[in-house]
């Protein structure tokens, strides 16, 4: 179904430290060129000593607010997507509202976690609230600090990732600017991407079998096999729901999952390759922040202009498939 919601502005935060793949080769005793060859990432940005999830989120939202000419008190809700929040409580969204100086009793603020599709999930929640008439203006942000959860002994699961944050401001619209938005899960693949420890099962009080259980691990080949089998049908259904053809899409903004994933998108799915927004080489996979950072890049560079059609598409741990077709 379509949603009477439009994107008003975008914002993003680029962390302070640029880390090249050559530097990772040297730091971890790899042959020169190994990290780049395996990941397709020339460099990624990691947080500096003074950067936090809260600070990056607040910066991205503030940038979007400034571009829209809004204040934080113009918002009815602030939703933040993240795999790992600033702290267990209160939410990163509430902390961000406080950082931005929001008045008491004005907005609702909460977090969501849907792995790499956290941004789309938060966008869907915003659509629900706005279509129901409860909210008129909503900020959706996504932030992740992947660099704090990487096992550098495992090249596949560590070479891809960067840190970052991005945000969009949404407003209820008299016309449906989000033409379709779908999310669906494949629970049989729940073990393909995981961080086993750090929750209520294994933690500082009940330690896991190995300290490595606090770090990210994935089965990239297993993910790609499922994506190759199921994604074409998912995308066909999404486009049909939106009532548009793949040729009508002006910009394709994928989750920057991997070089292999982006190549699959270009070669195996019915999109025009020149429309794909690919920032993997300079940003890596930023988990929840990956898709909105690519969206902000598309807007800021003129690859996506007002009135044009945009396809958001990606996968996330779970396994989740998600996509949206919107008129910017």
Image: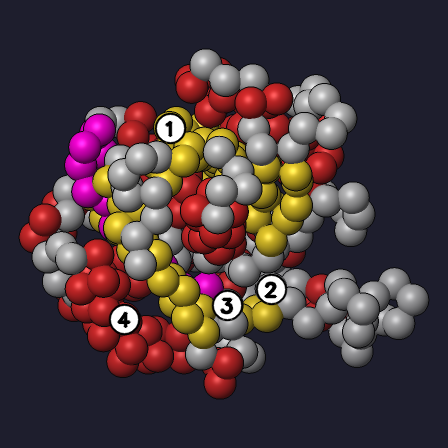
Looking at the image, residue 132 lies above or below residue 70: below
Indicate which disc residue 8 carries: 1
Q: Are marks 3 and 1 in contact (CB under 8 Å)?
A: no
| Mark positioned earlier in the residue sequence (3 or 1) | 1
- Front one among 135 and 168: 135
Left or right of 218 in this view: 250: left
Q: Residue at x 43, y 47 (%)?
A: 131
Indicate which disc residue 317 carries: 3
Please identify the quadrant where the N terminus is shown.
Answer: bottom left
Q: Quadrant of residue 52?
A: top right
Q: Which tag is nearer the camera, tag 4 or tag 3?
A: 4
Image color mode: secondary structure
Which stretch did the figure color magenta? 304-316
- Front one among 202 and 319: 319
Which residue is identified by label 2? 216
Q: CA distance from mark 3 to mark 1?
A: 29 Å
Q: Residues within 10 Å of mark 4 (few under 14, many from 20)?
A: some
Q: CA distance from mark 2 to mark 1?
A: 35 Å
Q: Which tag is nearer the camera, tag 3 or tag 1?
A: 1
Asked whether residue 162 appears in the rendered view, the answer is no
Q: Which tag is nearer the camera, tag 2 or tag 1?
A: 1
- Say what secondary structure mark 2 lies in: loop
Which residue is identified by label 4? 234
- Where does residue 68 sit, x and y in percent of width and height? 42, 19
User: Residue 203: within the magenta?
Assistant: no
- Say what secondary structure mark 3 lies in: loop
Q: Residues within 10 Å of mark 1 (few under 14, many from 20)?
A: some
Q: CA distance from mark 3 to mark 2?
A: 11 Å
| Mark positioned earlier in the residue sequence (3 or 2) | 2
- Say what secondary structure mark 4 lies in: helix
Looking at the image, residue 11 lies above or below residue 181: above
């Amino acid at each position: 179904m379509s949603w009477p919601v439009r994107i008003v502005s975008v914002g993003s935060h680029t962390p302070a430290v640029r880390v090249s793949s050559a530097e990772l080769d040297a730091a971890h005793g790899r042959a020169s060129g190994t990290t780049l060859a395996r990941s397709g990432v020339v460099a990624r940005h990691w947080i500096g000593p003074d950067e936090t999830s809260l600070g990056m989120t607040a910066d991205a939202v503030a940038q979007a607010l400034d571009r829209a000419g809004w204040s934080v008190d113009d918002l009815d809700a602030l939703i933040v997507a993240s795999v790992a929040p600033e702290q267990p409580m209160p939410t990163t969204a509430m902390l961000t509202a406080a950082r931005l100086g929001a008045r008491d009793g004005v907005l609702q603020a909460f977090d969501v976690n849907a792995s790499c599709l956290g941004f789309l999930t938060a966008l869907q929640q915003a659509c629900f609230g706005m279509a129901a008439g409860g909210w008129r203006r909503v900020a959706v942000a996504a932030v992740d600090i992947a660099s704090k959860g990487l096992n550098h002994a495992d090249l596949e699961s560590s070479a891809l990732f960067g840190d970052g944050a991005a945000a969009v401001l949404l407003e209820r619209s008299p016309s449906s600017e989000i033409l379709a938005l779908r999310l669906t899960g494949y629970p049989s693949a729940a073990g393909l991407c995981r961080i086993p420890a750090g929750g209520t099962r294994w933690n500082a009080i009940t330690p896991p079998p190995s300290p490595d259980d606090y770090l990210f691990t994935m089965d990239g080949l297993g993910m790609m096999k499922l994506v190759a089998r199921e994604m074409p049908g998912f995308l066909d259904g999404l486009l049909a729901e939106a009532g548009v053809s793949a040729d009508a899409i002006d910009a394709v903004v994928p989750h920057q999952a991997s070089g292999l994933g982006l190549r699959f998108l270009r070669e195996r799915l019915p999109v025009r390759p020149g429309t794909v927004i690919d920032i993997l080489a300079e940003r890596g996979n930023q988990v929840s922040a990956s898709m909105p950072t690519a969206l902000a890049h598309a807007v800021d560079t003129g690859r996506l202009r007002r009135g044009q059609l945009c396809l958001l598409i990606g996968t996330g741990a779970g396994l989740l498939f998600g996509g949206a077709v919107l008129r910017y």
